[in-house]
Image (spheres, rainbow, N blue to C red):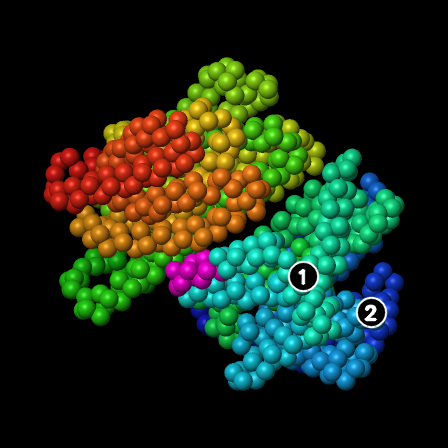
């Protein structure tokens, strides 16, 4: 017998799909039970099972089965967040297990904890499940905290999990640090979700959780909590468009933190800690261990593990989870696990394990950045998590805690990562693709089909422009100011990210190949870049001007820029090959001729990256241009780590730089393609190419002058005073040049804006921004001046005490750099790069004359005075040029740009 079932009527085309039915009761029960099981590693003091298994692992099997069954009945695909870094981790551990015949069991655990993230992320596809998960974390975590506090107060060790030999509470985790991390996670989930909804109830929940965290006595947890609270506040300011407030708060925090570190390192605080420890047993077992047993034991473990890394005979590691066993074989006096995620990843799984950890951290930060953007989440998910930026702060807790104990095996940590993945995969708004580019470089969205149909019938009639009312004008000015501050802050963040990546890369190269390989790294980065910029005629600086100008035909400008990029890169590569005998004799003699010839490849590839950043600037993609600054340096790290698994020396270094250039260039090209840069091309224009080249040469002359101005004092000081004085002065110079970051960011952001605007508007904006630009530089210099006397000797050693006075002198002059960057952006934007180069030339003359007079008599202090006065002279000359251009008619032929 055949039964026929009448199919339900289909929804009309174009209508929204019907919402999923909320039959989630059984799945929700399993989900809540799984979350409730997470802390139950050693309930009632029971020991863990075989392989350190526990009740959460049994619950995970049920939760995973329920998740797959729920998705299968609805024919939904399973999303696997963090799969690539986890597979890399397993592959690294598998290689280490094969080489050492140990550590295979831990690989199963790696895949097992991933299932927590997979299950919660996929159940979070439905807001009902995600609501249940978030509230379960808060209510269950608070209940467990109350149980632990009650047991601690009443002296019931079975409830509090108090240590046998101390007063630290561990609840059912069997480890006080593990318990601390759990309560911190619940605290940030409660704050991110703003649950409970009533303020007094929410603050009560937070108070209970913080009390429980304090009772664990975890110093590392407390430090991570304080840093994460500060980061959460800074992220909130950035999300609300108050980047200037965030920078001020961050500067104050760095100043206070630096002062605190200076006090702790210079003053004996142990008597005060002993006095505080006498007042309470919990204080004795927490802060009382700060300079005693806890610090000494971790220092011992860190030193031992680093020594074990250095003594490895192969790059594959000793095996996952085998640190304690290896220490026992070595008969170390203090045998423990690594207590550091970063060291453990490299020690146990080799360089491939370190690369896997980098990829995992990158994916986590990428997910957090995407969900934390303003209006990034849909309305339903934003109601559940109104403050998603706090999830990024909680990730920082894990990154900081990873310095003191191994947090990557925490089951509740992977469950929390699943919450982030759920918001990233299913909670974000769908981006609207942009396909058009206005003639001036600004992007436009494609017209709707209805509008496209109407446009074929009749041409649109332009509306009459009316003057905006005063309130609208003030609102527009405030919006413009917020945009400027946000873009400058983003550019500074990109530059700091690039500096951090470059610093890590330098340390990595130094640890692998010593000073000689660091020298090769510097030469291969700097020399091909200089030659490339010369051969492409300063195209990175010229591209934003011609892309942003509204009176330029973009169908000709864009292909012309593309051809100039290819021509410049080709000339650079050929020129390097032609000059390779000279480069070999002067710079690369110790590395061999083949390394010299191979360096022609990065001389070719660097041109695409440098010009690509300029193209992003000119197409009004300032966030992308700022991000490209960091991407350019960051992508080298994972690529070089992978190459190190089987290749060392300068060849691997050059290959890493080339692959990093290709990866960064591909990322930039994809971003340009998404914004319609490659659509609507015409034929390249030879005359326009000559105009672009002339503009770029005039700007590049200024860049060379600026480089000479910054480094002439060092060259002369090294020749006259010797390497010791030069080394001290170099530290002072680099430290003071941090103040240039705001000025560089202002120049980078405002240059395309000024090119888009008419002369009068650009002039008015520049006039209004001169004093704020100076104020920002002064505010950046003040904390550096205050901490220089403590920071420089503490970081570099007491021999660098002599660097403090030159630092203060350099800071006094470099505070004008904010104004310098602003005026240079204006002169470039109105088509006067030669004027900017002239102003920089005056600064070069000043430093040459004063350096020749002052350096022989006063050494480093004389060099600092000469350089500071040259900065002031450059700023003064640029201000004179600004007044001259400001008072010159825009119709003056000398100011008209050809093409």
Identified at 86% across, 72% down, the residue is: 46
Give percent across and percent down for residue 487.
Answer: 38, 54
Give percent across and percent down for residue 323.
Answer: 80, 49
Give percent across and percent down for residue 405.
Answer: 71, 58
Identified at 76% across, 51% down, the residue is: 301
Q: Earlier in the sequence, mark 2 or mark 1?
A: 2
Mark 2 crowd level (few <14, some 14–19, many ≥20, 10 Å Cα): few
Q: Nearer the viewer, mark 2 or mark 1?
A: 1
Mark 1, secondary structure of its residue: helix
Q: Which mark is residue 649?
A: none
* Image quarter (top left, top right, bottom left or bottom right) of the N terminus: bottom right
Q: Which residue is mark 1?
A: 270
Q: Which residue is mark 2?
A: 165
Q: Which residues are magenta?
A: 241-253
* Image quarter (top left, top right, bottom left or bottom right) of the C terminus: top left
| Residue 554 occupies quadrant | top left
């Amino acid at each position: 017998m055949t039964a026929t079932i009448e199919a339900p009527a289909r929804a009309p085309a174009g209508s929204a799909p019907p919402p999923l039915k909320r039959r989630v009761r059984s799945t929700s029960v399993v989900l809540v039970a799984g979350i409730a099981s997470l802390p139950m590693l050693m309930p009632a003091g029971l020991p863990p099972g075989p392989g350190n298994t526990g009740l959460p692992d049994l619950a995970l099997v049920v939760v995973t089965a329920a998740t797959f069954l729920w998705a299968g009945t609805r024919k939904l695909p399973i999303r696997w967040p963090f799969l690539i870094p986890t597979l890399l981790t397993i592959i690294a551990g598998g290689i280490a297990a094969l080489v050492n015949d140990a550590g295979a069991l831990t690989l199963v655990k790696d895949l097992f904890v991933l299932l927590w993230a997979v299950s919660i992320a996929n159940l979070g596809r439905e807001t009902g499940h995600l609501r249940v998960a978030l509230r379960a974390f808060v209510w269950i975590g608070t209940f467990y905290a109350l149980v632990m506090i009650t047991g601690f107060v009443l002296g019931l060790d079975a409830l509090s999990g108090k240590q046998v030999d101390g007063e630290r509470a561990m609840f059912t985790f069997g480890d006080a640090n593990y318990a601390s991390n759990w309560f911190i996670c619940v605290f940030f989930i409660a704050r991110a979700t703003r649950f409970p909804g009533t303020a007094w109830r929410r603050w009560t929940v937070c108070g209970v959780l913080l009390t429980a965290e304090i009772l664990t006595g975890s110093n590392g947890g407390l430090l991570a909590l304080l840093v994460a609270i500060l980061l959460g506040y800074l992220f909130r300011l950035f999300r609300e468009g108050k980047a200037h407030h965030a920078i001020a708060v961050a500067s104050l925090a760095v100043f206070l933190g630096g002062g605190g570190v200076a006090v702790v390192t210079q003053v004996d605080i142990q008597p005060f800690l002993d006095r505080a420890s006498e007042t309470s047993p919990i204080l004795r077992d927490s802060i009382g261990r700060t300079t005693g047993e806890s610090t000494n034991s971790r220092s011992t473990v860190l030193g031992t593990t680093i020594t074990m890394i250095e003594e490895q005979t192969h790059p594959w590691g000793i095996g996952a989870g085998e640190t304690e066993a290896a220490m026992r074989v070595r008969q170390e006096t203090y045998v423990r696990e690594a207590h550091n995620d970063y060291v453990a990843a490299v020690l146990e799984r080799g360089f491939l394990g370190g690369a896997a950890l980098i990829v995992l951290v990158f994916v986590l930060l990428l997910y957090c950045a995407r969900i934390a953007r303003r209006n990034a989440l849909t309305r339903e998910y934003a109601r559940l998590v109104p403050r998603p930026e706090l999830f990024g702060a909680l990730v920082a807790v894990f990154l900081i805690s990873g310095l003191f104990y191994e947090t990557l095996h925490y089951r509740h940590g992977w469950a929390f990562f699943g919450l982030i993945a759920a918001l990233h995969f299913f909670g974000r708004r769908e981006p609207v693709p942009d396909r058009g580019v206005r003639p001036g470089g600004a992007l436009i969205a494609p017209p709707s089909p209805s509008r496209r149909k109407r446009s074929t019938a009749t041409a649109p009639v332009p509306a009459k422009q009316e003057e905006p009312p005063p309130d609208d004008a003030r609102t527009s000015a405030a919006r413009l100011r917020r945009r400027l501050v946000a873009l400058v802050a983003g550019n500074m963040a990109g530059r700091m990210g690039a500096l951090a990546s470059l610093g890590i890369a330098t340390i990595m190269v130094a640890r692998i190949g010593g000073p000689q390989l660091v020298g090769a790294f510097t030469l291969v980065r700097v020399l091909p870049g200089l030659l490339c910029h010369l051969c492409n005629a300063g195209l990175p600086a010229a591209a934003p001007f011609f892309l942003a100008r509204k009176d330029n035909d973009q169908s000709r400008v864009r292909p012309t820029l593309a051809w100039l990029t290819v021509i410049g890169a080709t000339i650079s590569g050929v020129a390097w090959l032609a000059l390779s005998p000279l480069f070999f004799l002067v710079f690369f003699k110790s590395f061999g001729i083949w390394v010299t010839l191979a360096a022609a490849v990065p001389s070719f590839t660097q041109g695409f990256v440098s010009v690509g950043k300029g193209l992003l600037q000119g197409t009004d993609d300032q966030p992308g241009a700022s991000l490209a600054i960091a991407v350019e340096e960051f992508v080298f790290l994972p690529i070089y780590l992978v190459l190190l698994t089987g290749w060392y020396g300068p060849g691997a270094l050059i290959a890493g730089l080339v692959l990093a250039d290709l990866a960064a260039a591909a990322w930039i090209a994809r971003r340009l393609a998404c914004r319609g840069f490659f659509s609507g091309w015409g034929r390249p224009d030879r005359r326009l190419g000559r105009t672009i080249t002339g503009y770029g040469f005039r700007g590049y002359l200024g860049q060379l002058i600026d480089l000479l101005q910054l480094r002439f004092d060092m060259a002369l000081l090294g020749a006259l005073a010797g390497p010791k004085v030069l080394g001290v002065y170099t530290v002072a110079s680099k430290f003071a040049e941090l103040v240039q970051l705001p000025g560089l960011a202002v120049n980078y952001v405002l240059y395309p804006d000024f090119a888009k605007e008419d002369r009068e508007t650009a002039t008015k904006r520049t006039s209004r921004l001169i004093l704020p630009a100076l104020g920002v530089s002064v505010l950046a210099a003040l904390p550096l001046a205050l901490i220089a006397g403590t920071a420089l000797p503490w970081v570099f050693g007491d021999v660098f005490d002599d660097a403090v006075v030159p630092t203060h002198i350099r800071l006094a002059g470099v505070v004008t750099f904010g104004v310098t960057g602003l005026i240079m952006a204006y002169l470039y934007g109105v088509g006067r790069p030669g004027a900017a180069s002239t102003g920089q030339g005056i600064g070069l003359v000043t430093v040459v004359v004063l350096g020749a007079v002052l350096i022989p008599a006063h050494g480093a202090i004389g060099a600092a005075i000469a350089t500071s006065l040259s900065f002031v002279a450059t700023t003064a000359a640029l201000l004179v040029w600004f007044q001259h251009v400001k008072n010159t008619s825009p119709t003056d032929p000398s100011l008209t740009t050809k093409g």
